[in-house]
Image (cartoon, rainbow, N blue to C red):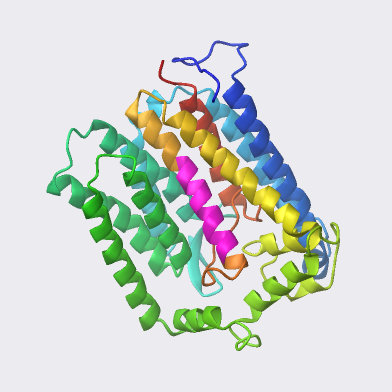
Amino acid sequence: MPPKLSTSVRSPGHVNPTDLFLFGLIIALVAFGLNILLASSSFMAREQFSDPYFFLKKQAFAAFLGFLGMLAMTQIDPDRYRHLVWPIYAISVVLLVMVFVPGIGKRAGGANRWIVVAGLSIQPSDFAKVALVLVLARIYSQAKEVDLKLSLMTLFIIAVPAFLIAIEQDLGTAIHLVLVGSALLFFTRYPLTMQLMALVAVVAAVSYIIIKTPFRLTRIKAFLDPWEARYDAGFQLVASMKAFLAGGLTGKGLGEELVRHHLQERHTDFILAIVAEDLGALGVVALIGTYFVIAAYGIIVASRLKDDFMRLMATGFLLCLIIQVVINSGVTMGLLPTKGINLPLVSNGGTSLLVYLIMCGMLLSALRREQN
């Protein structure tokens, strides 16, 4: 049984068991991520930047800022978020539009996913995840019933950031956002039949996008038969599979094995393959298991919250985490078509790490309020 929590914000000096448990697991994930990042990127960083610690130093700085943000969020009364959700959502949409503004938006790898602020690259789609959860939590914590007007409003709220992210050539993150919004609706009064209808519409829209986009259609074909396309579109997936095979049950230990050098995104989207090669299947199970423990334990505690806004906000953040883990691990293991989505709290990516740590702080703050 989850520990009994106070119904109000804790007093100074009071130690909350839920805080300690989840905070400890989050710390462990970030620390593990920094170690596996060094193991996966040092050779590449030495070749490209003449500094084997280049990626590690950037990620460690993001982790430092993220932990400061997380600690700050744990000290803020969650009620304050309730009154800021619409400005936060509006700002996130504006940031998504700004990626297309010349001189502000940054294009890389054929995609417009970043904006440059004071020399730093920021990915606005990460902030959109927080904004979407907060808005849906606010709307459905106040709704007495779900009518057509509210349903259309919900679809619009989800569709706007998802569409902007999709046209940035980041379909994976757009799908993730839609899945988070849809999954969160299961914890509200939203009718199941309407959810299924929305799901059919989303599947149809994604299928149309894939069919009309040659490189995405090629990825689907490579996913269905990666070994046939191992010298082309299936190269990355085959390299990931080889890393899993090379690691076996217990792995080869943290280091610079040759197999990993065939992975082009080994420090970002395919970092789980490095975990498999270095720590084996047992390491992969332990890592993914840690995510599921956080999500399951957190959702159990969140379900006992009296305040609907707090309950939906906490649940939404946990869904955001675990759905991204499922997508990333599925891609890395060849269970899902290749998408550009990283492993939260572990993969290289300063904006993602910063946002998820802030999200964790907001989560811990909300979970302090439990029903009697």
Q: Quadrant of residue 284?
A: bottom right
User: Can you give x and y, in whole percent of width and height, for residue 261 in the image?
Assistant: 78, 73
Residue 102 seen in render: no
Left or right for 337, reference 234: left
Height in image: 112 above or below 68? below
Residue 99 shown in magenta:
no
Locate the C terminus and report the quarter of the image it occupies: top left
Locate the N terminus and report the quarter of the image it occupies: top right
Q: Main secondary structure of the magenta part?
A: helix
User: Can you give x and y, in whole percent of width and height, for residue 323 in the image?
Assistant: 49, 52
Seen from the viewer's position, the closer of residues 41 and 50 is 41
Identity of the residue drawn at 25% across and 39% down? 189
Seen from the viewer's position, the closer of residues 344 and 223 is 223
Height in image: 165 above or below 20? below
Height in image: 245 above or below 96? below
Q: Quadrant of residue 17?
A: top right
Seen from the viewer's position, the closer of residues 308 and 88 is 308
User: Can you give x and y, in whole percent of width and height, for residue 196 in the image?
Assistant: 27, 57
Height in image: 340 above or below 9? below
Identity of the residue drawn at 42% across and 50% down? 128
Q: Which residues are magenta?
A: 317-330
User: Can you give x and y, in whole percent of width and height, for residue 198 in the image?
Assistant: 26, 59
Q: Quadrant of residue 66?
A: top right
Left or right for 72, reference 28: left
Residue 332 seen in render: yes
**Total label count?**
0
Identity of the residue drawn at 46% across and 48% down? 127
Residue 328 shown in magenta:
yes
